[in-house]
Image: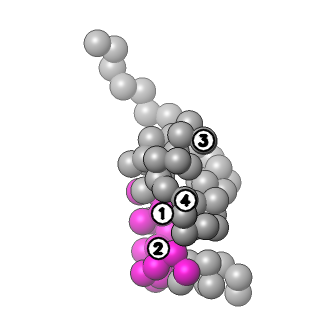
Amino acid sequence: MSPMVKKAYSAEFRADAVALYLSDPSHTFDGIGNDLGVSRETLRNWVRTERKRTGASTVWDVLRKAQF
């Protein structure tokens, strides 16, 4: 079995992925992750980090704070 290689994603790519996930409550980590070629866990971690950074506890909190 080959060793896992950690892929580096730009901050812009991560921010766009989080924004895409948060843009619609029907989006799932699996769906967006598959569309973008990242694992669901990677995307989930990015969203969790953004929520902590902004102090938002819900998707709508993050979107509201991003608008201002």
What residue is disc 2 on? Answer: 51
* Residue span colored magenta: 45-60
Residue 13 location in percent, x, y? Answer: 65, 50
Front: mark 4 or 2: 4
Amino acid type, callout 3: Asp
Labels in figure, total:
4
Q: Are marks 1 and 3 in contact (CB under 8 Å)?
A: no
Contact, CB < 8 Å: mark 2 with mark 1?
yes
Q: CA distance from mark 3 to mark 2?
A: 22 Å
- State the CA–CA distance, disc 3 to disc 4: 11 Å
Question: Which numbered dot is residue 27?
Answer: 4
From the viewer's perspective, is the residue at label 1 or at label 4 nearer?
A: 4
Query: Residue, x 54% and y 64% (percent of image)?
Result: 26
Q: Nearer the viewer, residue 7 or 47?
A: 47
Q: Earlier in the sequence, mark 3 or mark 2?
A: 3
**Secondary structure under the numbered disc 1 in the rendered image:** helix
Within the magenta stretch, is there residue 47?
yes
Do residues under tags 4 and 2 come within 8 Å of each other at their CB atoms?
Answer: no
Residue drawn where x is 53% and y is 83% of the image: 61
Instruction: Using the image, determine if residue 41 lies above or below residue 64.
Output: above
Which tag, 1 or 3, sits closer to the chain's start? 3
Q: Are marks 3 and 2 in contact (CB under 8 Å)?
A: no
Kindly identify the amino acid type of the residue bearing the numbered disc 4: His
- Which residue in the protein does label 1 denote? 47
User: Badge 3 local density, few (<14 within 10 Å), some, or many (20+)?
Assistant: few
Type of amino acid under label 2: Arg
Could you tell me residue 14's position as x and y percent? Answer: 59, 53
Question: Is disc 2 surrounded by few (<14), some (14 to 19) or many (20+) residues within 10 Å?
Answer: some
Picture coordinates of residue 2, whole percent (x, y): 34, 14
Q: Which residue is mark 3?
A: 35
